[in-house]
Amino acid sequence: MKLVKLFALIFLFGFAFANGTTSNNRKHYIVYMGDHSFQDSESVIAANHEMLTSVMGSYQGAQDAAVNHYTKTFRGFSAMLTSGQANQLAESNKVVSVFESKTSHIHTTHSWEFLGINNLEQYHQQSRNSTSNVVIGVIDSGVWPESKSFSDYGLGPVPAKFKGECTTGENFTLSNCNRKIVGARFYYGGFIADYGPLESFNHTFFVSARDSDGHGTHTSSTIAGSVVANVSLYGIGRGTARGGAPGARLAIYKACWFNLCSDADILSAIDDAINDGVDVISMSLGPDPPQPIYFSDAISIGSFHAFQKGVVVSASAGNSFLPKTASNVAPWILTVAASTMDRDIQTKIYLGNSQVIQGFSVNPTEMKSFYGLVTGSAAAAPGIPSRNASFCKSNTLDPALIKGKIVVCTLEAILDNRKEKATSIKQGGGVGIILVDPLATDVAIQFVLPGALISLEEAEELQAYMASQKNPVARISQTKAILATKPAPQMAMFSSMGPNIISPDVIKPDITAPGVNVLAAWSPLSTDNTAGRSIDYNIVSGTSMSCPHVSAIAAIVKSSHPSWSPAAIKSAIMTTATIHDNTKNFIRRHPNGTQTSPFDYGSGHINPAAAIDPGLVYDFDTSDIIDFLCSTGATPAQLKNLTGEVMYCRKNPKSSYDFNYPSIGVSNLRGSISVHRTVTYYGEGPAVYKAEVDHPAGVNVSITPNELRFEKNGDKMSFVIGFTPYKASNGEFVFGALTWTDGIHVVRSPIGLNILSV
Ligand SMILES: *[C@@H]1O[C@H](CO)[C@@H](O)[C@H](O)[C@H]1NC(C)=O
Ligand SMILES: *[C@@H]1O[C@H](CO)[C@@H](O)[C@H](O)[C@H]1NC(C)=O
Ligand SMILES: *[C@@H]1O[C@H](CO)[C@@H](O)[C@H](O)[C@H]1NC(C)=O
Ligand SMILES: *[C@@H]1O[C@H](CO)[C@@H](O)[C@H](O)[C@H]1NC(C)=O
Ligand SMILES: *[C@@H]1O[C@H](CO)[C@@H](O)[C@H](O)[C@H]1NC(C)=O
Ligand SMILES: *[C@@H]1O[C@H](CO)[C@@H](O)[C@H](O)[C@H]1NC(C)=O
Ligand SMILES: *[C@@H]1O[C@H](CO)[C@@H](O)[C@H](O)[C@H]1NC(C)=O
Ligand SMILES: *[C@@H]1O[C@H](CO)[C@@H](O)[C@H](O)[C@H]1NC(C)=O
Ligand SMILES: *[C@@H]1O[C@H](CO)[C@@H](O)[C@H](O)[C@H]1NC(C)=O
């Protein structure tokens, strides 16, 4: 709990200049009205104003209160309202629900910088042409259109089905869109209603889709950046940068400002994206944990409409590193965790006795000579206890003792501002920093002076050396990329974990993909986390970075199978994932190599080539989702809250674990049960698939039939999974897997059971 609080603090830091949401007791509410049959946006807005007039008392009042209007794929608006006015609106029979617009955060560990190398080449390289008809909508902080990654060289005309537009704005003209960036829109009404004028943030910004934060440029280029040769960050990790789907098109929806995204704006962006005709929506952002119930969460509601219209939504699970913190967990969203790649960056620290210590950072320069080493605790400023000085925070170090030296610092708390320590050393005349950081050694920061993070083991070596010398010295080298590191992938320390607190029968996250040390395009104006240096490509980490990898693969699967539903695409990605690392052992979690479970990575690490040809698919549609929600106790009123239509549950709803999800979860197993699933065969000619079971502890599993014979492409077959428990799992989940295979395709579903009684 403490960690969550600390984590929240980092975000609060970003709120420093924010304007309160509660001035004169009005809050920002989303008034959601579901589907509509109005002819055009103008009539929806007129009707919205009329409805608002009834509670505000005047038309002028209504206009002043209204913030955003949702007019395309569903109807609604957001407005500044008192709770009384919100309740009054909620009572209208036209209104489905009224809920507060909250703030989502981008999912980059934005105060940290990481180093590594782009290994997108490991992915299946679909030819440029086959994805050229796919459009990915990216809801983020905009785009830096001049980046070479957005060149449209060799691309054909914009797909005719795309109906979006290139909205011009500050430093963004029609010529900033091309055949790569096929659409650009931006939204700030919700943001300024919540936080006040953009100017009050004292940061560079553009009132347009132009990105001054870097985040949106990074995620967009990771998804569909064109091939750009000879890219690096300060020469580190030099190579060819390419998005996962370099032939695909990007539609940019800027709804995030200074790393904050108003839910009211996100909902506008989703409304537009669906209506514009995108195939995939990528959202590297989400609510802070705990995940809100779907019925009052803008992202869940918006994504549901997207799913209904055949649009895949891929979203990041978050960076909250604790169990039960995964966000964006609705079953109709592809929820993405983050893991490491098989390339690493290393910053060697040479000691005076020719020992070498392994460090991690983004260190562009090579120290030419050795400098004296001093610990922060031995360099306390007058009146500062040495323990306090060991953390190297501002105004705790004595300049006379650190001048010309490399200072060795420790962490006080996991979320210490690591960059600030280097800044305080630089201010005192120090020349380098070595930070003992037991957690974030894969978290490489761009410090304002040469520096590196080291692990506890390395710290012991360093300490032994320093204790043995009267005048210990060290030299910090320039960072180098190291290839083929093992083991990889490992789950990132920060990646948010399941179980799913809203629907515990649906295992979350769904999938993991590279999210540590990802090199991609950047906004040259975003220098907060680059030690003030203006750069075109940057290396950052977070589930924000893994989500676009999955969005790109979803686009490739979509281009190979244009008729597949979002659920089928999701199934293809999940059932082909791997749970092994490059040492053939099970994927472990950084930094201590701890054991993992599907609550870390869902079905496993993404395997793009296999996802294109999964063999079998677990499909589901909107009515299956409704059945699932009914089985978990959703009321007709709640369903209306989500779908916007009057809905009734069937008399005898199926069991929640019978939802045809590509993974198998039972959160309250009491005695024997039968779980049902149906698979669709995609292949040429007849095929026979056989079941293999990895039994979870304490339960016997039977599959009936355990052989599926398909005649032709598109055949569906159902089977029953019998669970007979013989040992309760004491409140913990136990895990196993069901795998169907025809000898070529491997269709794997993790099983997660909480055995309450036998
Ligand atoms: C790709 O598409 C372009 C135009 O749509 C066409 O000229 C070109 O021949 C295609 N390339 C391949 C390899 O199919
Ligand atoms: C934005 O446009 C203004 C006016 O055209 C220009 O002076 C400025 O340099 C531009 N800024 C950037 C970052 O391109
Ligand atoms: C807060 O918002 C109000 C109204 O939008 C504005 O007048 C005021 O300047 C803002 N305050 C700050 C600190 O930005
Ligand atoms: C705004 O930023 C400038 C330049 O970074 C800085 O000098 C100034 O103190 C900042 N103002 C506030 C109110 O933080
Ligand atoms: C790559 O770029 C660097 C400088 O940015 C240059 O020195 C080098 O020659 C380039 N390499 C190739 C193969 O173009
Ligand atoms: C030293 O740190 C402790 C807590 O970590 C704090 O309470 C105390 O005020 C600090 N002392 C000084 C002199 O800064
Ligand atoms: C990793 O191990 C270190 C040393 O035993 C311990 O302090 C730390 O809490 C562990 N971290 C995690 C995430 O388990
Ligand atoms: C519908 O959503 C609103 C806003 O979250 C909530 O207050 C209301 O209770 C919901 N209705 C039902 C039946 O859940
Ligand atoms: C589980 O399977 C084993 C071996 O097939 C069998 O001996 C045992 O009786 C089974 N247990 C239950 C509870 O069915």
Image (cartoon, helix red, strand yellow):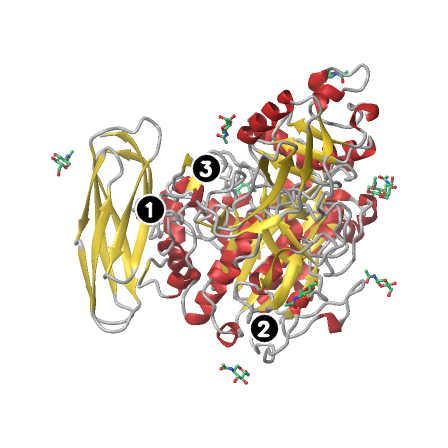
Q: CA distance from mark 2 to mark 1?
A: 37 Å
Q: Residue at x 19, y 49 (%)?
A: 703
Query: Which dot, 2 or 1, sits closer to the camera?
Result: 1
Of labels 1 and 3, earlier in sequence is 3
Q: Which residue is mark 1?
A: 750
- Crowding at mark 2 (Cα within 10 Å: few <14, some 14-19, many 20+): many
The picture quadrant where one finds residue 363 is top right
Q: Is mark 1 within 8 Å of ligand 9?
A: no
Q: With respect to residue 153, does 644 lie above or below?
A: above
Q: CA distance from mark 3 to mark 2?
A: 37 Å
Image coords of residue 656 (percent x, y): 34, 44
- Crowding at mark 1 (Cα within 10 Å: few <14, some 14-19, many 20+): many
Q: Residue at x 56, y 75 (%)?
A: 161
Q: Which residue is mark 3?
A: 501
Evaluate if marks 1 and 3 touch, with contact meaning CB atoms under 8 Å apart: no
What SS does tag 1 mark?
strand
Of labels 2 and 1, earlier in sequence is 2
Of labels 3 and 2, earlier in sequence is 2
Find residue 494 and name its label: none
What SS does tag 2 mark?
loop
Which amino acid, mark 1?
Answer: Pro
Q: With respect to residue 353, does 396 lie above or below?
A: above
Q: Is 677 placed left or right of 217 in the picture?
A: left
Q: Residue at x 69, y 63 (%)?
A: 185
Pick the residue in front: 343 or 166. Answer: 343
The picture quadrant where one finds residue 148 is bottom right
Find residue 162 and name its label: 2
